[in-house]
Each structure stands twice: as C-alpha cells, then as structure tokens.
C-alpha cells in the first residue's frame, strides 16, 4: 500500500484552507432544536430476541432528526445485574452498514460498558443489515448517501444522520443501566465522523474516539481519492460541474473540520497513512483544527482504512475505561 | 466480449419461469388512477434558453407520480412552424442520466418528430444532469435506485418512475405542435424499460421501441451478472438474505416480463448477445411473453449493451416514420 | 455475483469422481498416533492479558503435530464461575488469520460456550495475527500454504494443520470449565475444513459446523476458480505441469471429500451458490459423500464466500445449544 | 478522480522544456505544398442517404495528404435554404472514431453552422465507423496510430492526418452554403489537436476550439500516464529503448506545443484537471507557448477527459456564434 | 485459471461449423505465385554483430509478399563448421514481437539445428523489437494487426504475413549450412499459426510444430474471449456490426482451420485447456480438420497460453531431432 | 508507465536514511563461517539429461546454508573441449523461479562463459520449476518468501538464500572447466540482489552485474509500491503493526543498501525509472552507498522492471567479456 498523501511531518502541520461556512453555529442550533422539539413517542426499549448469554440485548427505538424513529441495540453485560450504572459507549457504524443482529457487535458490552449500537438511516445494505428508514427524498444525486441533498444545507442526508447521532446521546438518559454522565461516542470511518460530530454538538459527551473518520476535509479528500464513498462526490462534481463550488460549500456544513474545534472532551483518533478511503490529510486537518482539546492521535504508517484495527480496539478499551472512571 | 448467456436458439425460445404477481393489474390501475387524480398545476411549457437554430426547445413541467413535478424538454423542428401537428417521440433515459441541456438529445427532433425528453426523478448525476427531485425516502437500500422501496410494491422507486413515464404520455396532449394520436415511446436501457412499460400501461401509445431494455427478467439477470445496476440488487440480496425471495416478488411488480403481454402497438426491440448490463435472456423473456403484439427484434451477435447503436438509430428513425404515418 | 457452478438441482446430486487415495485410513491413524505419542510439555493454560469483563481469557499452549506447540485462546463466560462445565466450541480460523487478540472472537463465549480459538501454524499475517510457528520447510511451492509439501502425503502442510485441529479437541480435556463430552468443532472456510476433518478423525467430537468449507473437492475447485487460496494450486500445476496428476493425488489425502464419510456426529454446513473462493460443487461433493450422518445444509442462493454470515451465526448458536444439550 | 498532475498555479505557468525541432516551419511548408500540388479529382459533394429533416446531409470526398481521398459529411441546416452563406464549423474527431453515419453528429448544424465532419484515415473502428483508407504502411509500431512512422518525420501517421485537417479547411471553399471567411476548426481530444494544428497551419481559419486536446506535450504526457493512446508510445519506448530519444524528437514535429505559437485567430481551449488521457500539463504547455493569440481557457477542476462536456458545448456554441459574426 | 471452453471429450470431437471459403485454393495459389514472381534482390545473408560464441549469427534479408524485404536471423551452431548440412528450424514469432537481437532466441541452434528466426512485418514493438516494414496501409481497422484489410481477402495483413512465412521456407535453400530437405516450421501462438500455414502451403516442409496456435477458429474464438489479439476483432465487429458476417468470411481465408487439411508432414501441436488467448476449441477445430496427417497433440489441463512451455520445448527438441533424421 | 518515484537528478543523489544495523559484519561472518563449517557431501557434478548440442549440461549439487543441498546447472560451451578454463558467470534467478530445465537459460554459455544457474531454495513454482528444498519453517508470515523469519535476523529466509549465493561462488572451484579467478555474479531482480550480495560477501568475485535488483532499500520500497514481492511485506506490516519497526530492523540485515559498500570489484547495474516492482530510489540508495567501487549504472527512462532487457544482455555480455579478461 503506497503512501499517496503528504509526508507525516507535513500532515502533522496540515490545516484545511477552507473557512467554516457562515452561520454554521446557528445552523446546528436550529437543526438540533427542531429535532428535540419534534413530537415523538419517546425512547422505547424492549428485550431483543437473541441467544446471547453474557450480554442482555434490548431493541431500542429513539427519536432522531424530525423526531423520526431510529433503531438501535442496547447491550448490557448480564453480570451488571441492576447494580451500578455502567459507563456508556454509543457506537456509530461505518458506511453501508446497519445495526445488524444483536450478536454482531459485542466489543464494548464485553468490556463492561453499556453499549448503544446506533443504526444508520437508509443504509444497512452493503455489509450488514439496517432497520431504519430515511423518509426523505432528494434532488438528483449519485448512488449512495454523500451527495443526497447537496443543493441546500437543510437537505443534506448527513444533516439528518448527525442529528440522529446527537439524539442517540440524548436517548441514553432514557435507557436502563447506563450512566448518562459517562457517555462516550465511538466509531470507525463514517461511525468515527458521527462520534466526533456528536461530541462537538452535544455537551454531555464525556469522551470520544474515532478510527479513520470520514467527513474530514471533504473537498481535499475528493482531490486525493476516487474510492467510495468520497468517489460518489467526485462523480457528482464531474457531472454537475457548473455548481461544484456551491456543492462543496454546502457540504462544509457537515464537515468535521468545521466542527472539531467545538470538542472539549478527551478525544482519541487513529489514522492510517495509506488510507485511500479517508485520506490522512483530511483527518489531520480536523485534528489540527481542534483548539479546545488535545486529541490523542495514533498514527499507523503501514495501514490503510483499518488503521490500528484490533490493536486500536484493545488500546481504546483501556483508554475509555480510564477516561470514563 | 465473450458470450455468456444462452445460445441464440435457446434465447429465442426462452420464457421466464416466474408467474406474474397476484393483483398486478389492480396494482397498476390503482397507481395510475391515484397519479391522475392528484391535485397539480398541470403541464407547463415555456421557451428554454438555448442557442439552437434548427430546433425550438421548451422547458416542460408535468405532473408525475402523486402529481409531483417532472421536468422534460420539448423539442420541435423549427421549420414545422405551427402548421401540421407532428408525430411525437417520448424519449426516456438510461440509468443515471437526466434531461441534461436542451442541445444534448437532438436525434428525434432532427428527424422531424416532436420530441419529449423526459427527466428521471432523482437521477441525473452519473453521465449527465437531471433536474427532478424524488421526494420519497426509503428503507435500507443499496446505493442506487433499484433496491429503493423493495419492502413493499407501493414503495418501489420504479413504481414512481414508470408512473412518471405513463404521465409523460398523458402530458403530450397539452404540448404545442405534437399529434397526440401518433405518440411513440422510445428509449435505451432503463429508457427502453420505461418505453415498454408505458406502452403496456397507456393505451394511447401508438408505437414503442426499446434498445437493450432494463428491468426485463430481474431475477434471472441477477443470477447472470453483477454489473450495475442489476448488481445493486445482487449486493442487496447477499446482505438481506433472509428476505431475498420476498424482495424478488416485490420487484416482479415492475418487471417488464409481466407487463409486456399488455402491449398491443407495433413494437421494436434490439438486443446485444454479449450485453452483461442487461443480459439477453431477460430481454427475450419479455419478448416471448408478448402475445398481443409481434415485436420486430433485432439481434446483434457481437454487441453488448450498446446493441445496434447508431445503426439501430438509423433503422428506428425509418421504422418510426413509417409506423406513425 | 453471477452463478458460475452447476445448477442447484445438479449440486444436490453432485458426487466427486475421485476415489479416496489408497491407505487413507492408515495414513491418518499413523499421523495421529505419532502426534499423540510425541514427547511434549502438555497443555498449558494461563490467564491472558485483556480488559474483557464478560469473558475470562486464557492463553493456551497445546501439543499439535509432532508435539509442536500450538497457541490458542480459551474464553469462558465469567458468570460460569466454576460451577458447571460448559459445552465447548473449538473454533478454527480462515486462511491467513490467526488467533489475534483475545477480544477479537467473542461470539461463542458470549453465547455461553467455552470457546477455544485455535491458532493456525505459520499463518496469521493476512487479516490478523498468529502466534504459532510452523517449523517445517518444504520443497518448491507457490506463495501460501496449499502447495507446501505436495511432493508426498507426509509432507503436506495441511496434514500438520489437520493434526493440530484433532489435537485441539484432545486438549479440551485439560482445560478448566469445559465439558469434554460436549465438544463441537466449528469454522468458516479453512476453519470449516478443519472443523469437518477433526469431526471425521476424532470420535469425541459431538457436533460439527462448517460455513463455506475449504479443502472440499480440491481438484474440481481448481478447474472452476483461480481465486486464492485454490489459485495457489492452479499456479503451481501450471508450472509443475508434468507432475500435476501426482500432486492432485497427494492432496487427496487432506481433501474433506474423502474424510466426510467418517463423520457420525450431527453436522451443520452452509454454502453460498456464488462462492468463487470455495465453489459449491466441491462442498456438495463432500456433503454427498457423507453416509454416516445427515448434515443440515443451508443453501444461500445470492451469497458468495460469506454464505449465511450473521444469519448463519444466529442459527448455528441455537442449533449448537440444542445439539449439545 | 484524484489529481495527479501539477497544482493549478504551476500548470498556469508550465512551459514545455523541449525546443521546437529544427526545420519545423519548412517541414510543414513542404508537406502542405506537396499535398496541395497533388493531382486529384477535387472536392466532390453528393447528397447522402439519411432520414434527417432539419439538416441536409452531403457525402463529401476531398483530397488530403498526397491527394488521397478523405471522406466527410457536410451538414447544412435545411432552413438555410440557399440564402446566405453560413459560418462553418470543421469538426475533427476523437481517437478511434470516424465520421459514422450522418445523424451521429448534429450539434453544429443544429446551431446554425455549416458543419463538416471530417473522417480520420484508417481509424473509425473503436467507437464508431470510419470510411477512409490510410494507404500507407509503416515500420514496426505499437497497435494504434501514435507510433506509426516514428522512424522519420516524413513517415508519421499524424503528419498525414494533420495534412488532411488543413486540406479539409481548403475544401470548405468548394462546398455549397458555407462562408469560407468564417471557418472555425473544432474538436475534442485528437479532434482538438487537429483543430489547433489546422489553425496554426492554415491562415484561413477564423477561430479554433479544442476540448482536452491530444498531441500536446507528448514527451511529458508519456511520463505521466499509460492510458491509451499515449500509452501506445510508452509501450513502444519501453521496447525500442535505445532509440527512444530519437523517436521523441521525431514526434516533436507533430506536437501542438511547437505549432501553437503560430495560431493567430481567436482560440478556445478547455481542460480537465484529472484528465489521465490528455494530462493537463501537456495542454498548458501548448497554451503557454501561444504568443500570437490569447486563448480563452476553461479549467474544470473535477473533470477528466470529458472536461466541460455538454457545458463546454453550450458555451462554445455561443462563443463561436459571436466570434464568427 | 478456470476452464471456460468445452470439456476435453467434446474438444477432442469438436469440428468447426464454418465451411472453407470458395476459391480458397486458388486464392493461395495466386498469392504465392505473385510473391514468387516478384522482382527482388534475392536472399542476402551477412554476418551479424554479436558476441555469441557457440552460435554464428547472420543477418538475413529475403523476399516476402510482393517481394518485399523481410528480415531474419540465421543461427548456426559454430561447431557445425561447414561440414554437413544441418536440419533446419524456421521459427515464427508470437504477436507483437520481432526478431529482436541475435542472442534472444538460441533454443534451436543450441540443439544442433540451423535456425531461421523470421521477423514479423510491422510488428516488433510489444515485447521485443522488429526490423521489417509493412508498407501497406488499410481501411479503418482496430489497433493491431488482426483487422487490417478485412474488407477484402486480398487486403488482409495475415495474407502478407503467411506469404512471408512460406517464402521464408523458400529462402532456406539460399542460406549456408542448412539442409533444405529437412526443414521444420515451428512457433508459438501467432508463430504456431504461421508454422502450420506454411506447412499447409509449402510442400517442402518436412515437419511442423505449433504451441497454442493463433488463427484457428477465429469466428469461434471471438465468441469465447475478449483477450487480445482476438479481442481486436471483437471490438471491430461491435462497431462494424452491419458487415460483421462479411468480415468473418474474409478472415476465413487465413484461418488455419481451412488450411490444416492440406498438411501432410508430421505435425506436433500442444494446447492449454485454460488458454483464453487462443481458446482450445478453435485449436481442436483445426486439429480435427486434418485428414492428411495425424498430429501428435499434447494437452495441458492446467495451462493457459503458455501450454507446455519449457516441457514442450524439451519434448519438441527430441521429436524434431527424430523426425528430421 | 508513469513515473512515480523521485526525478532522476534526485535519484542520482538519493541516500538511504537508515543506518546499517549494529553487528552486521559479525552477523554475516558468523553466518558464512557456520555454513562453510557444516558437514556436507561436497560439490557433486554429473551430466544432465538434455538434447543440447552446443552446450554441455551438468547437474550440480552444492552445499549451501547449513550445508543443505542446493541444486544448479553447470553449462559449458561444448567447443571449450577441456582446453582452457573459461570465465564463469554465476547466475541467480528472479523471484518465484528455479533452475528449470537445462535448456532454459543458455545466454552465458552461448557467449563463451561457464555458466552456473543456481536454484532458489523453496521457490520455483511461479514462472518455472525449482528443485531445491528449503527445510526451514517460520513463524507467521505472508504468502511468499520476504516475510519468512522476520522475527529474528537468524531466521530470515533471505539469510539462507544469500548464504547459498556465496556458497555457489565457493562451489565454482570444484566444477570442471571454469576459472575460479574469473567469476562474475549476475542476475535480474532477486537474482540481481543475490549477485550484489555475493559480491559484497565473497572476496573472490571478480565482477558483478545486477539488473533491477530486489532487496535494495526495503523500507523505502514498501512505502512506494504494493506490487509483489515487496507487497508481501506491506501486507505483513499492516497486520503486525505493533512490531513493524522491529521487522524493518531485522530486514536491514539482508538489505543490499547495507552491503553494497563492501563491493570492491567492477560493478554493473541497470535500473528502469518506471519500475514499480523494484523502485529506482531503493536501487540508487544501494548504488550511492558504494564507496569502494564505482558502478557502471545504466538508466532506462521508459522501462519498468525489465530495465534494459535484451539491450542490457548484449551490453553486459561485452562488458563481462572485457572485465573478466
């Protein structure tokens, strides 16, 4: 896997040349306020069908963007038995996946955390199954999610998905056995972007961790790679060439580069230097924009999009245990 | 381009093993009745910005599925000058494209037809631009259009797109200069599927022509190819494996195989024997299900998805001229 | 994913045309007797470093082929607390992987089984890490494992690996908390081949389950696919063309087709009809050679090498729970 | 589509390091004089078989290199009816194509120009059909046209093709309905190279336009890309490695970089920054060598070889209309 | 390498369904008579520059098609010293190669044969260098040689190349040290086709050997493969679709299937069952058309276009030594 | 073939940033001393089966690493007849190949050298056959040779292979007809690395020549390319990410960069600037570390891994003839 991005010393200094879009703070305040003000059935949590023995699984429905119903699994280590409230990991998923079946993601519950596995609306058809509708259409768009709604910041698919992520953190307070004061957001790739965005937009997040996060430096990434999902945007810009600059301006509203400065909690990020799916300079751009927190950054010189993989998972389990205690 | 499907003599006899889904006639009657009953602003037709000299271009908006606004171009040969009404070609577009700019599709107007270039809702981002929203979301789906709404026949994206196609034929009566009694539906690939479906569902279609039509024998195609767009479905079925048979049953509602028997007008179809995008056995399955019309079938042994290309275009221009006179 | 192998009705009848190699029973009796007779340090089991909470992890070393030390993880649900002995899943791994870190494979322990994750000697460098040496060289061979030692049945790499698998079952009796009378062998791909081979060669196996097993119908597979790892053999035969038939005869000694008739315990097998890594006809050849057991066969028409994936895992967890009770 | 060439600010300054070959002016003077002096049957123009209604199509034969017969279509808007002479677009074609059928290229005639679609000798077998022989053999050459005749400037295939292009401009004076004083040369890729070369070599060209032109900075392009057709040369140089420098010196005779300084008419050029077929630095090298004209350069940051596509066509139609009035 | 053609037992019976074109005998008689009647400088043979010690190398020029000069190397084992005349191997080359440098092909001279390495006109730019012009142009053609001149049997490139091959056999009589009564024609791929064609058309050939010969069953091959060089034809037929059948009829004139029945000398052929460059059914079609000789056929089940490679070379050296003694 | 490495002027100055590993001299002294001290059957040389006439072929077995038996061919020009002792070329082979059959490599014997074609232990299954076992296992490793034994310098596969190369030079003294005072080591790719390493480690080597040598600047190469065989290491480092730096330190023991400064004999090296298999900067790093010899470096700007190919062979034959006289 050849190196294709800047040398490491340049990456460590790299800053995005794009300013935050005007009105970004208001955009997100309005978006979240509307979501929280929507009329909903509230958070529902019922036992899930599963043959698991070490973990109790619950089928969760919570209100997301516009109050729409979002699915999740709530996984509690069985031995936790009702005693103390556990620290919580809210886990977001990579592009194309969904919450799947309860037994598919046991990592955090097995490490003693209450784990909320949050479905991704309209996804869950590439590498495992989802269960949440995205009841919003769009204008002309590339196959995939990245270019849906790029005609206006209010139409962006990722506006909805990030709002769902923030509302997932809200939902924790309504679930049994978790400690709402010790909530971490965690994820890989798209899940990492959601983890960081939720930490930026929700003051109740106590720690956040992202492996190879997506949506960092979108305009730069699309210059460096045509791998999906950034490639969806490259294809779109090639066809909609006369509005390309406008589209990039719209996407700035959901670029983690412009949100990360608002993260104040402890932050853990890992990056692979040969990652053509989420190129490292985009991620370093988001890292180097953080001025309210000093993230722990793990750099993997020989890895691509998997970054630190199982080694990251082991490290992060210890880091989160320490950070949330 | 190797041959990969049945030998020609077997293709010429091939019949789909799948029965039409129960209630198919009612399904489409209800769908079209609802669309025609929707409250709309009617068909609008205003001059389009263009530097064309031999063709007058109009920007058309007509009500489609649920009365939603669909864009099109209406192209009239300038010399037609208001005199006689012209025979009409309603042209549907291949997957991923849209109506583009007025000068992009001059074939039929240049051959003396009034030409309606119909946009495809939500598409128009792969090979040229579209201008029509698809304001409907979906459950979890593969990137692309084919698996949107496969949880229920009423949710299918292609239910909406086929309805738009039928309503495009309806719209012709409201446009200047075209002869509503001499309307042909025409298209390539997805456009061919829409042409055939509109001919099956709209009694006012006087002739129909499809080059390498999509949506013919979906269940068979997905056994033969993983090329897009059928590959979208293959990927979906691999993930949603426990509901795969249900999904194929839902898709039967928009499979041309189950509609082609209702075509009664003169029909022209061309097929490439090495077409991995729309495999020939699926197309022959739709051809061999036609018992109310005898289609003219052009077989191109050495061609793929382009089938007869410019040679088909030349042949079809003459065939349509004769057929619509 | 196109279908490329026989139609399903032919697969269900498919029998391998190759006879079992002469002396196969003695070959394996001798091999296992030598392994069991080797002078070793016995089975060692010490607590493993891990942050897991629901599962206790132990670092296991057991004697394999020639008494050589094989690594494994022994994972016990923590709540099992020393009380009853648990049913045991001995899990073998896919090609190129190793036991990795203790937290990487929690499925069976989380479902209430004592789980032995068995390392694969000399592998563990493609998709995760291994920890076991293979201290045997070979004659000229393709990159990879499949053609190592193909000059003589006694030299085959897979002779050693299958022996390790049988000895892993032996080792269970020396591990705390597991019930040696309720041992299942389980795996996917190469792991599935080892699960079946161990069930054939070890009378103490009480149930066995293989998803998309490798090493079934090797000579047929190499006619159908050049995907790795069978492609290693295809490349080897192309170069060593004058000894190709001999090589296939040597490999018959480790082909599951010739071992499966000796399986007498309940057997669960799943197969994907578009699996180019382990083509379905090879697997059906092994299935249809079973005359001492009636395997439960799950056929996935739209899947490749993943076969039933998470759906298989859910089904198998229930099947094993019932079967081992 | 990743960026692979220089950053835009460097492109805008990029100058080819290669000097023009000695004797270049005389080379082209001699070549054109010989062509014009050849004994020929002159320009022939007969009505073409076609069903077109808005355009009158004529089958043209004109004398090219060595007086050899070159085919073209002459397309006149029917309404022009004999009245005024029309401005003329001489259109050259991309690599591998030919004039095809008359209805295949209606763009310029539909915009009110007399349009000459010029066939490419010996080509017309990759994406549509040609009708013109190239009755000249060559020494050893790669498949394709670029390396034919690279042993000597007089033997180059592109010497013949460029001469045909110049003679196409000559032929306009012999065709009905066109205004010889308002002739533009236009094309994409190879067609763009021919348009520019003809403008450089024929003083009667009143405007010229090239989208993503080929043959600009050949020696640089072959360092940057192995895509066809430049890849033909890369493969040739790898085999004929001891004469590689000589070959590049021969090809300098047909490199637009060394001709563009002679263009004095209004010039329109578009370039895609991710174009691996005709890399942007080669094109900017030709642009920046123009010192007798200030080209209008359209830069498309997100496009490849299609550059501005339909947007370019719309823009160019307006620009040419203004420029030729 | 998967099997993709007929099963071996069907291959062994396979006969081409295409009849020989009318007038084929006269076509070749006329062609060869014209070549032999051309006015030429005769065969020239001068010492070549080389550092070889075991072999004396001569630079040969002989008259081929139309008497045009064809280059070759004449390699004589040095120890042969002028004594007896040696048996001769006339070696023809694979597609895209040329005679290269004298030291590149030492096989036959090192085995004690006088070896004539015959250049291929106009080729020699893909895998090594050629030195012979092909001074004939063509009509529109695909990149490469296979479709040059397909408008008429007299224009075919391979008519010229096969004639060169026959004339190479003629030339042997004019070279020092070879025994004109013991001449074998030998080659791989295109070289194999030339070897067989020369044996069919030249009664003085005493033995012939072809490994994986090209030009056998062209019309069938192009249904089975799109690999080059047959893929050149597939691309051509896809574009020139309306004349495709005519083109295949023209190519029948140089198809070995229609010439092999005229071979009467001992014949050696090898074939790889996974050869996608020259599919086995085409070769078996040529083999099974031989009714004047019983070829020795070596079938390699696990090989592609290399067929028996070095094993074939060893076998053939012994077979030729025996056959030519 | 695009340029992907540094510009030539930077290559010519490029020095590896990695220091030689501590104890490197002792490591190799100990390794070679142990090999030479092993108890062996000595060098055996018996006539080989072959039909060659200009060359006498002998089947050689000599003691390599640990005294293990290594196979080779000894090829003598037949005319050399026992008279003078000939200069010797010890030829090492590219990755995946073996000594094959005696007739496969006739280049050096045909140029008047005694030629020793040295087999590569455990290889000889990718592009031709080998005959030598590598009786050493390894820890977990990628498919292929490069990562075998990377846990410790003493375990490295290439420690054994380089030792075999040095011992091949030793063996020459025991073979008939060669002049032990005029021994050159020669090879391409892996063979080039062995040639250089043997020249560095064996004072009796009188000249050495490497085309596109492997194992030069391993740590840099794996940043630039994922082509095999360096790609084996890239894949390994991605999985074994926590020990990646240690692994690179171990591999420094067999990197030619750290050995080339010990070469004192005349040295010939060629390099292709587009070589993605063995990137040029790695090779220049080894070249620029040579301070005891001034290598003749041939740079091929348009070539990949083949570098100068047959042109290099011709040049090298003359250079070696002059150098060894």
Image: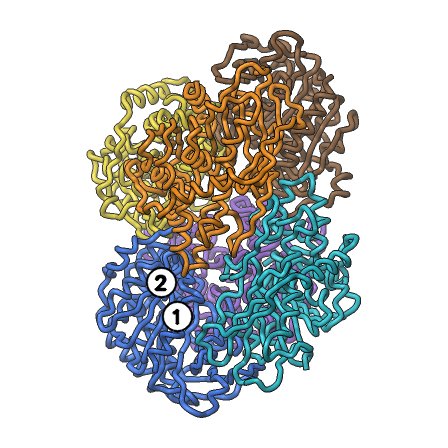
Chain colours: A orange, B cyan, C brown, D blue, E purple, F yellow
> In terms of depth relative to the viewer, which is nearer, D149 or E214?
D149
Asked whether residue B273 is in view, the answer is no
Q: Chain of mark 2?
A: D
> In terms of depth relative to the viewer, which is nearer, B87 or E64?
B87
Asked which quadrant contains residue D286, the reply is: bottom left
Q: Nearer the viewer, mark 1 or mark 2?
A: 1
Q: Label 2's element? A: strand
Disc number placed over residue B247 in the picture, else none: none
Q: Is residue F108 left or right of residue F259?
A: right
Residue at 58% over, 11% down:
C38
Q: Position of residue A1 (x, y in %)?
A: 41, 39
Q: Is residue A206 left or right of residue B134?
A: left
In three-dimensional space, the C-alpha distance between marks 1 and 2, rounded to whole angstroms, equals: 14 Å
> In terms of depth relative to the viewer, which is nearer, B296 or E12?
B296
Q: Position of residue A233 (x, y in %)?
A: 45, 51
> In terms of depth relative to the viewer, which is nearer, F67 or E244?
E244
Residue at 50% over, 88% down:
D46
Find disc 2 in the rendering and name its residue.
D271
Asked whether residue D242 is in view, the answer is yes
Find disc 1 in the rendering and name its residue.
D315
Q: Check if mark 1's residue and mark 2's residue have beta carbons within 8 Å.
A: no
Q: Position of residue E223 (x, y in %)?
A: 62, 60
Q: Label 1's element? A: helix
Q: Position of residue A297 (x, y in %)?
A: 36, 30
Q: Earlier in the sequence, mark 1 or mark 2?
A: 2
Q: Chain of mark 1?
A: D
Q: Is residue F149 left or right of residue A85?
A: left
């Amino acid at each position: 896997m050849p190196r294709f991005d800047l040398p490491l010393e340049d990456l460590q200094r790299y800053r995005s040349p794009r300013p935050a879009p005007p009105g970004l703070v208001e955009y997100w305040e309005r978006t979240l306020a509307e979501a929280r003000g929507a009329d909903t059935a509230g958070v529902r949590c019922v036992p899930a069908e599963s043959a698991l023995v070490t973990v109790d699984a619950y089928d969760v429905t919570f209100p997301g963007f516009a109050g729409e119903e979002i699915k999740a699994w709530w996984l509690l280590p069985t031995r936790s038995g009702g005693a103390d409230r556990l620290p919580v990991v809210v886990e977001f998923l990579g592009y194309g996946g969904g919450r799947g079946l309860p037994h598919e993601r046991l990592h955090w519950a097995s490490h003693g955390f209450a784990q909320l596995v949050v479905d991704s609306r309209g996804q869950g058809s590439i590498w495992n199954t989802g269960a949440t509708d995205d009841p919003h259409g769009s204008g002309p768009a590339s196959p995939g999610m990245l270019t849906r709604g790029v005609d206006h910041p209010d139409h962006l698919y990722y506006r909805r998905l990030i709002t769902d992520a923030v509302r997932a953190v809200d939902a924790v307070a309504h679930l049994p056995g978790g400690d709402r004061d010790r909530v971490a957001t965690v994820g890989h790739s798209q899940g990492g972007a959601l983890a960081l965005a939720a930490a930026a937009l929700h003051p109740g997040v106590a720690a956040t961790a992202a492996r190879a996060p997506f949506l960092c430096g979108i305009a730069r990434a699309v210059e460096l790679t045509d791998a999906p999902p950034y490639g969806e945007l490259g294809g779109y810009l090639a066809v909609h060439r006369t509005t390309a600059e406008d589209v990039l301006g719209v996407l700035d509203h959901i670029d983690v580069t412009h949100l990360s400065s608002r993260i104040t909690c402890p932050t853990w990020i890992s990056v692979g230097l040969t990652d053509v799916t989420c190129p490292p300079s985009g991620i370093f751009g988001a890292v180097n924009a953080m001025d309210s927190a000093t993230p722990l950054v793990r750099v993997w010189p020989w890895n691509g999009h998997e970054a630190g993989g199982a080694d990251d998972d082991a490290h992060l389990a210890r880091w989160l245990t320490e950070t949330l205690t």
